[in-house]
C-alpha cells in the first residue's frame, strides 16, 4: 500500500470542536483509508503518472474531509467515489482549456470554423426566398399570425393583444395559415418535380 498521506484535519475551515474532529479522524481512518488501494486503481485509469495519482489522491482526501466536516456520510464508499469521479472530471476539464495568451493567432489552432459551405448558403437563401414568396401569397391575417408566432416568438395571448382579436381566433389563424402555407410550399414543390 502507498504511504499514508498527512491530512491536516485541524486546518479545515470551521473545525473547532475537538469531539467533532475526533469523530472525523476516526471515520476517515476506519472508512476512507481502507478504500485507498481501490481508489489508487480508480485514479490511475487513463495512464496517469504515479505523481499525478498521488496529487489526485491528496486532493481527493482534502475534498472528502472538507465535505464530511459538517456531517459524516454513511455509507462512505459511494460518497468517496462520487468525489473521486468529480475530481477526475474537473481535472479533464482543466486539461482541455487552452489559454488565449498561448496562441497569438487563432488560425494556428487549425480549428474547423462553423461557417456553412458556399453551396449551403445558396440553398438556404433559395429556401428563404421560396418561404417569403409563399408567405406573401397567404391572406394578411394568416401571414401576420404566423410571422408573429414563428419569427417573432410571441405567444398566442401576445398576438391576440397585438392584433386585437380573440385568442381562439389567433389559434384558428395559425392552424389554417400553417395548413395553407404547407399546401403552397409542398404543392409548388410537387408541381416543380412533375413533367410538363
Image (cartoon, grey):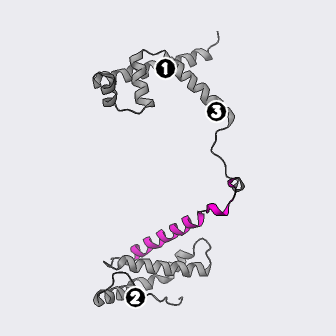
**Splitting the image into 4 quarters, where does residue 148 fall?**
top left
Q: Nearer the viewer, mark 2 or mark 1?
A: 1
The residue that disc 3 covers is: 121
Residue 72 at x, y percent in the picture:
32, 79
Mark with earlier residue (2, 3): 2
Q: Is residue 82 magenta?
A: yes
Contact, mark 2 vs mark 3 (Cβ under 8 Å): no
* Above or below 171: residue 80: below
Q: Residues within 10 Å of mark 2 (few under 14, many from 20)?
A: few
Is residue 15 covered in magenta? no
Q: Earlier in the sequence, mark 2 or mark 1?
A: 2
Nearer mark to the viewer, of 2 and 3: 3
Determine whether the residue tagged by mark 3 lies in a helix, strand or loop.
helix
- Picture residue at 49% right of the left edge, 90% below the top: 4
Q: Main secondary structure of the magenta part?
A: helix
Mark 1 neighbour density, 10 Å: few (under 14) some (14–19) many (20 or more):
many
The residue lying at 63 percent from left, 29 percent from top is 123
Determine if residue 37 is in view: yes
The residue range painted magenta reads 77-106
The residue that mark 1 highlights is: 135
Q: In the figure, 169 relative to 56: above or below? A: above
Nearest the viewer among 55 and 129 is 129
Q: Residue at x 49, y 17 (%)?
A: 136
Alpha carbon separation for disc pair 2 and 1: 73 Å
Residue 165 % position (x, y): 29, 21
**Which residue is more in the foreground, 73 or 119?**
119
Q: Nearer the viewer, residue 60 or 145?
A: 145
Q: Under tag 2, what secondary structure? A: helix
Task: Give the residue at mark 2.
Answer: 29
Q: Position of residue 17 (x, y in %)?
A: 29, 87
Amino acid at each position: 500500500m502507498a504511504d499514508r498521506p498527512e491530512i491536516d484535519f485541524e486546518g479545515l475551515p470551521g473545525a473547532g470542536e475537538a469531539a467533532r474532529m475526533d469523530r472525523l479522524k476516526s471515520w476517515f481512518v476506519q472508512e476512507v483509508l481502507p478504500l485507498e488501494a481501490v481508489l489508487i486503481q480508480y485514479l490511475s485509469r487513463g495512464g496517469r503518472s504515479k505523481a499525478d495519482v498521488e496529487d489526485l489522491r491528496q486532493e481527493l482526501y482534502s475534498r472528502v474531509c472538507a465535505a464530511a466536516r459538517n456531517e459524516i456520510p454513511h455509507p462512505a464508499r459511494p460518497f468517496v467515489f462520487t468525489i473521486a469521479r468529480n475530481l477526475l472530471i474537473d481535472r479533464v476539464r482543466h486539461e482541455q482549456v487552452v489559454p488565449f495568451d498561448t496562441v497569438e493567432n487563432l488560425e494556428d489552432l487549425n480549428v474547423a470554423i462553423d461557417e456553412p459551405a458556399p453551396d449551403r448558403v445558396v440553398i438556404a437563401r433559395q429556401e428563404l426566398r421560396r418561404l417569403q414568396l409563399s408567405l406573401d401569397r397567404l391572406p394578411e391575417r394568416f401571414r401576420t399570425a404566423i410571422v408573429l408566432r414563428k419569427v417573432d416568438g410571441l405567444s398566442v395571448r401576445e398576438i391576440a393583444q397585438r392584433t386585437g382579436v380573440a385568442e381562439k381566433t389567433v389559434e384558428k389563424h395559425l392552424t389554417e395559415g400553417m395548413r395553407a402555407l404547407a399546401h403552397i410550399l409542398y404543392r409548388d414543390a410537387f408541381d416543380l418535380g412533375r413533367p410538363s
